[in-house]
Image (cartoon, coloured by chain):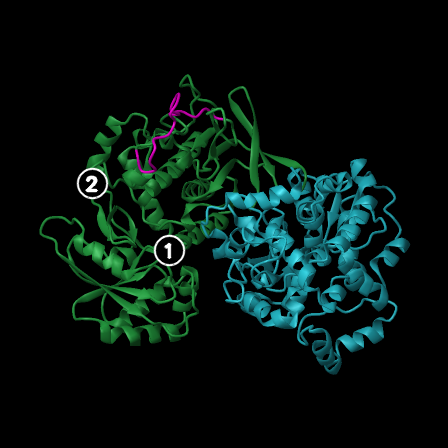
Chain colours: A green, B cyan
Amino acid sequence: MSPDAVVVGAGLAGLAAGVRLAQAGLRTTLVAKGPGATHLAPPTIDVLGYAPDLVECPAAALASFAAERPDHPYARLPAYTVAASAEWLRALVPSLAYVGTIEENLLLPTGVGVPKPSAFVPEAMAVGDLRSGGRFAFAGLRALKDFYPRLLAENLSQAKLPTGVTVDARAVQLTDPGAEADVSPLGYARMFEDQEFRSVVAAELLPKLEPGESVGFPSVLGLHKHRTTWFDLQDRLGRPVFEVPTLPPSVAGIRLFHALRDAFVLAGGRLLMGSTAAGAETNDGVVRNVVIQSAAARTTPIEAKSFVLATGGFAEGALFLDSYGEVHESVFGLAVSGVPAGEPRFAPRYFDDQPMARAGISVDERLRPLDLEGNVAFRNLFAAGAALGGAEPWRELSGNGLALASGFAAASAIVEGVS
Amino acid sequence: MDTMEWVRGSLDHCVKCTICETFCPVSNVTPLFPGPKYVGPQLERFRTHDGSPDASLDYCSGCGICTTVCPQGVKIAEINSQARAKMKAQRGIPLRDRIIARPSAMGRVGTPLAPIANFFLENRTFRWLLERTLRVHRKAPMPLFAGRTFQSWVRRHPPLTQATKAIVYFHGCSANHFEPRVGQMAVAVLEHNGYRVIVPRQDCCGLPLQSNGLFDDARRYVRELAERLEPYARRGYDIVATSTSCGLMLKREAREILELEDDEDLRTVSAHMFDICEFLLDLHERGALRTDFQPLDMRVPYHAPCQQRGHGIGKPALELFDLIPGLEVVDSDVECCGVAGTYGLKTEKYDIAMEVGAPLFRQVTEVATEVAACDSETCRWQITRATGIPSVHPVELLYRAYGLS
């Protein structure tokens, strides 16, 4: 009674693959050391923001973007797959109420007041779309460190926006009595779920607002009761209220994690959190099992028919550079392509073009990892998310778009192979 | 590299992502504990042989969730546990912590005097006095003595004669002194599946001592236990535990927190140690678990304790419950019940523990028709004390469904 599929990794890519597999009726086990970037980054599905100029319509830009970059994961993920994955997510997590299409990017203010292009975003963030301009007040919470509404508003006032669009942004600082000296975004999320707290905040904020202003809050408007928290605050303030991403932890991202995790368990998936995929046994071009290290001083192989690698990139320890300058993939020992040969391996400054950052797993059109000769490494192994090479998500603004589309597509490839 | 070095050295892998802080049940309800990242990898850098820069560390409950969820593999809970032991050694360990950390010693005193001891434990004046003198909260869940130990029961229990397989049962202090029924049901369920159950003489695993910072005593206990279990493990017998936190102590915690990575006995025992639900589910996956379950028509809230999740085995109890017809189980999505072993007994921490557990208590009250299910004894006592709803080990539901009662 071994599972049909094993997914390694619980970021957006792994969770999306896991849910899709489990919902397709496959017995699915998801193994993860811990949660992934959902807890750090906003749950906006950024498909393609810069290529390298600002992208207004991802659907139109994707084809040429991929054609110019044959090693990019988007060269394996056609625009209709990207769109299908987002539609699937929209239906899967109604609690986040995703809006948007692949046809256009919204422009959302970040925590430092930069307009960020994104295609599919939770409704509570979409209200802050800057493309039609308007008057915005950004509310600062006294005890929330690392969220500076004045910096946000000043930067936004100077930001480059589409021609003809004017944005009037200013900061409103709240004293929010009752808060401790230092409260995390999650702490505020819990406080905002309390009606009493919302009424105190609204009472202090209302007289400070000017007519016609929408209000941007750091994205801490509730965790489990986000919708009611957000709606209630809009009612109390009598105007549109929206969320702006914060520094980690990302409350809005945790909402997405909860929704996907719950969907996975509801669909009958088995979640092994806190275990490490320590290796795998393979033979004859087929992965036989993934070897799990749990608390005991023994390893346990989990056999399955298909496997999805969604462990992330360098930052997650899924890829690592050894002292000989070689890059390794930690679970299956896959070939890593795009590793710069010879010295210097790194450009001197952090934000310089760093070829090493594009190193990762190369895959075929069904997302099966390739060996160095370009052949499919294992017939039943699929890769998704930040493990894939060739992308620079932080420059392209493509991280969650790639994670979702590749996780979805890897699962689809398995489901199609089974049926 | 010695254990201390790699446990402590793992803090260099911390990228300050705050994932641990989003899960920490304690820092999410009280500012007295500023969170695992802050107290762990951050403050550890400032701890020298002269001591710890602040005492907030003492408010860590040791539930271990931070380590379970850390995607970088930082041994946050272990770092904090070691630092707390050093801090307590320097600042002095309260008499209370020295007493409540010895369940087997309490058991030896309390068992022959059970009627009298239980009378006092249930007496409000005595509990008030206990709070005033030892700072054990008067409302905190304290188990009652069973009067007859599991060991004395099992010595008279006729072993299964025609068994072809044998297994070792590690019952822990709670089944021995407070809930021998759990041990008896575990034996019955294992025998029903054709196992001869071997119960070696055994004492405490040292976990409560470890969480109260008494590392030397904890090492003595766990080494002695490992020495008693090792001969069986060496010969290939698997060992099952009904006490999920004590099972985890033998699997991993003693090796990492008490720096016993080199203890060969412990390593051998760890390699053969199973949580009982983990073992039974494994049996089921090999097609070897009997599934002659009779229907249990009830709705049961299930809470996987923090220490259960530390095993990294998922929630096998839930999958076993799925095999029982009629049984409706609602999995709690709450991180922690708050008690964390002996943490919630302490007067200065009782309110924190109750607030941590509050969402769970609400869920249990809403869902339960008869009982709640939970793997860990101290969590069961906490749930029952807070909700008035009896809480049972998952093995009890299997026992009932097998018709063994």
Amino acid at dot 1: Ala
Question: For the point 67% across and 72% down, which residue is it?
Answer: B140
Residue A76 quadrant: top left
| Residue at the spot of label 1 | A252
The range drawn in magenta is: A334-352
Residue A243 magenta-highlighted = no
Amino acid at dot 2: Val
Specify the quadrant that holds the C terminus of chain A.
Answer: top left
Is disc 2 surrounded by few (<14), some (14 to 19) or many (20+) residues within 10 Å? many
| Nearer-the-camera pick, B133 or A242 | B133
Q: Residue B112 location, x and y as percent?
A: 88, 68
Residue A343 magenta-highlighted = yes
Q: Is residue B377 above or below residue B288?
A: below
Question: For the point 84% across and 71% down, which residue is it?
Answer: B114
Is disc 1 surrounded by few (<14), some (14 to 19) or many (20+) residues within 10 Å? many
Q: Residue B379 location, x and y as percent?
A: 65, 62
Whether tag 1 and tag 2 are in contact, CB under 8 A, the answer is no
